[in-house]
Amino acid sequence: MKNKKKKRTSSYLLIFLSIVAVVLLLIILYLTFFGKNSLNNKYLAKNESGNSQALDSDSDETAGFTSGDEDLDADQQDGFISGDEASGNESSNEDIQGPSQKESAGPSQASSDSDTIGPSQSSDSEVAGPSQSSETEQAGSSQSTEFHSKGSEASPSETDNSRKTASSKTQDNSNGKDDSTAKADTTPEISDDGAISPSHGSSAFDNRSDEKMDTLISQINSQLPTGNGSWSVYICDLAGGSEASINDTPMQAASLIKLFIMGAVYEDYDALSQQYGSATLDGYLTPMITVSDNDAANSLVSCLGGGDSTAGMQKVNSFCQAHGYTSTSMGRLLLASNEFGDNYTSAYDCGKFLKEIYQICAGTAQSQSLSHAEDMYALLKQQQRSNKIPATLPEGVSVANKTGELSDVENDAGILYNTQGGNDLVIVFLSQNLTSAGDAQSTIAQLSRSIYLYYND
């Protein structure tokens, strides 16, 4: 009996120990499986968070900036990874150390410390840019053999007219005064035999007929692409005092709107400096112009409106109207949807703005129409994007320019100075509804070289 009881006790003990062992094994397996799942979940959550941030920011970042003027390839950029309306052909320069960039439309708040301000940037092209509006898609898809010109007071309604004419206007720059023998204000128009005949317009120049400019305009017009979007061109011979435009009509500004944001800020610079600090303003102005940072532009618009971006855009529009840039308007922040408005300018408006900066700095302007022209000129001279107007110019020629891109827009506006022949120039190219942005860039580069050599070879 005792042996049987011992055997039963041993059996119960073995069964108990077996159950304990199985339970411990199950616990160990559970903890092992649960631990792996926990780590995997954390890893997946971290990856998802990182991917979400990557999607929210400009697709590429270089030297602290995501690129800005809209849907451009990295191989088209000068030191940038693409990023503005999808980071653009042009992205911020690696030599520029600046704030990180976001693809948000809202302005980043200005800080009193310029070292901590750095707006998140999406340089020259507006990344994830809005779709092109129907108005711009229809703005002259094919090039006409006629030219459209406008004086400094021309209205947008005039430029929307289907007639396309060109103006050739001249000025005696030797003393900055009107020539008493100057002819009436003229706007050349193509006649049946292809010649340019004068008609009325207005300009800061003397408006004398300039046969040399007329010939150049005819040549450039014949070389503009007929199967790659619609184009507008402005040329000004700063030494000879003549200017003319081709197909001058409001077109999508892309980042060229930043020229006029800069002008509005400098016009109210002293008051804004008291409110935000000059270091803060300069910390936004420099990247906005030199690497076309979008968030810096939005921050300046917010500053102009005292924290209200809508009021800031109205300040930009008021600046444009007051100075006669009547085809230029700001209807949205950079990177914002164009559902309710867009940004427009014209080749003439951009050329007029650059011409006034040049003449003020050269001492040939009849009036100080723009505030801080020297500071604006200095910023434009620091431009990092050089794949269009400056790309094929002879060595030694300097360019102070501002570019702009969207997925189907290529713009560039520049002052050519230190020219070998002494004929400094202003050249502006606007193009939209493009089928090939790369070909448009090459067109701008090649025609800019032709224009330069025409006056300086």
Image (tube, helix red, strand yellow):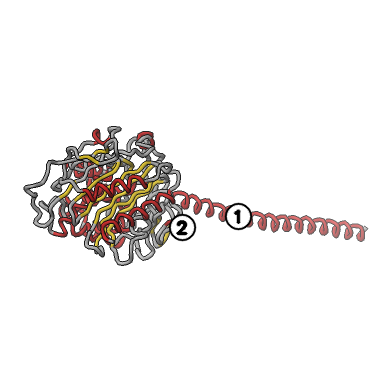
Q: Is 284 in front, or is 230?
A: 230
- In the rendering, at what x and y percent does residue 392 appear? 36, 60
Decide: is 349 above or below 397.
above
Amino acid at the residue labelled 1: Asn
Q: Neighbour class for label 1 at 10 Å: few (<14), some, many (≥20)?
A: few
Q: Is 449 in front, or is 376?
A: 449
Decide: is 80 above or below 183.
below
Decide: is 79 above or below 162.
below
- In the rendering, at what x and y percent does residue 365 appear? 13, 54
Q: Which residue: 25% across, 63% down?
A: 419
Q: Is residue 81 visible?
A: yes
| Drawn side of residue 180 relative to residue 446, left or right | left
- In the rendering, at what x and y percent does residue 187 appear? 20, 40
Q: Is residue 112 visible?
A: no
Secondary structure under the numbered disc 1 in the rendered image: helix
Q: Is 225 in front, or is 38?
A: 225
Secondary structure under the numbered disc 2 in the rendered image: helix
| Quarter occupied by residue 165 | top left
Mark 2–mark 1 distance (CA, rounded to whole Å): 37 Å
Amino acid at the residue labelled 2: Asp
Q: Neighbour class for label 2 at 10 Å: few (<14), some, many (≥20)?
A: few
Task: Return the residue at label 1.
Answer: 40
Q: Which residue: 89% across, 59% down?
A: 7
| Drawn side of residue 37 relative to residue 207, left or right | right
